[in-house]
Each structure stands twice: as structure tokens, then as C-alpha cells.
Image (tube, grey):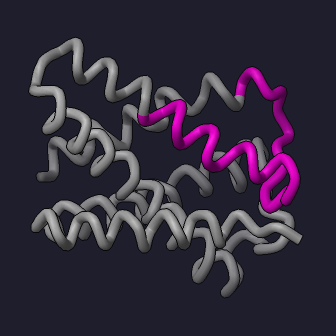
Amino acid sequence: MIRVRWFVWALGVTLLTVAYFRGELRELTISFCLGMIGGFFFDIVGVKMMNLWYYSRQPFLSWKYFSIVVSAWGVFGVAINLLWEWIIALMGPSLRVSLSAFIVVTLILLLFHELPNLKARNWKYNTPAWLVIIGWFPMVMLFRLIFIVIR
């Protein structure tokens, strides 16, 4: 049985390694904490209050939830912000590059998280797929904007 957590773990180790060699551990730490807090907030609203999705193997607020899901949210926050920063560093700061980074990062993470989950079913949605896809864009933008304000 495929578990998305192993994909997330591999992504986290890869990002940590690259951030270490680039001297970006401060940004990594801020993004990880932001991801955990923001993800927990999204789960309170999406899982508990609105019943938009649920975790089939890690019941909300259980030990497994906090050890697996919340840390995966942290890696998600790191992936958003560091990938975005690396695209800007590679292509130069401009509105066009930021918009491109937003689209590229959102689509990469959407595919990286949702495609394996189609098979694994670690989380299940109670909403149509089109709403899930649309919801990724404001979610990624919110994580990014909060990172910019905090840093």
C-alpha cells in the first residue's frame, strides 16, 4: 500500500538538504512552523467545521494526526516558500516571475500531493474534484503571503 507520507518525507529531506547547502535554514524553519500552524488551522476549518475532507488513517486530533499530518503540513509550507524563492532567485524578481512561480509551485504541489492520494486515499474529500483543485490556489497564496509578512 502506497502512503503519501513517504512522498512528503522524501520531499522534506530533499528540501532540508538543499536549504542547508544554500544557507536558508531560517527560511526553512519559518516555513515549517507556518505550514504546521496554517495546516492545523485549515484542518480545523475544513475537517472539523465544514466537513470538506477527512483523514482515513489519522483521525483528527489523534496522536497519528499530530505526528504525521501536522508535520506534513509543515513540509508543505516549506515546499511552497522555498520553491517559490528558488524560482525568483533563478529568474529574477518581477511580477511576471512571481505569477509564474505561483502557478508552477501550485501545480507541482497539487500533482505531488493529489496524484499519489488518488491511489492511497490517505485523505478523502466530501467535495467535487473541481472545488478541490480551485481551492489549492488561494491556499498556496495564503501560505506565501503570510511567509512574506513574517519574514
Q: Say if 27 sits above or below 118 in the image.
A: below
Observer-nearest of 150 and 25: 25
Q: Residue at x 84, y 47 (%)?
A: 118
Task: Give the x, y percent position of residue 116.
Answer: 75, 52
Q: Say if 93 sits above or below 70 in the image.
A: above
Q: Quadrant of residue 67?
A: bottom right
Task: Give the x, y percent position of residue 61.
Answer: 67, 75
Q: Residue at x 15, y 51 (%)?
A: 150
Judged from this view, the residue extending furthest toward the top is 96
* Number of numbered discs on residues: 0
Observer-nearest of 77 and 126: 77
Observer-nearest of 129 and 115: 115
Task: Give the x, y percent position of residue 21.
Answer: 17, 70
Q: Main secondary structure of the magenta part?
A: helix
Side (left or right) of 18 relative to 64: left
Side (left or right) of 87 relative to 51: left
Side (left or right) of 137 relative to 102: right
Judged from this view, the residue extending furthest toward the bottom is 63
Q: Residue at x 72, y 24 (%)?
A: 131
Residues in magenta? Answer: 105-131
- Is residue 75 magenta-colored? no
Side (left or right) of 37 relative to 31: right
Q: Residue at x 24, y 47 (%)?
A: 147
* Quadrant assignment for the N terminus: bottom right
Task: Give the x, y percent position of residue 63.
Answer: 67, 87
Q: Say if 32 sits above or below 63 in the image.
A: above
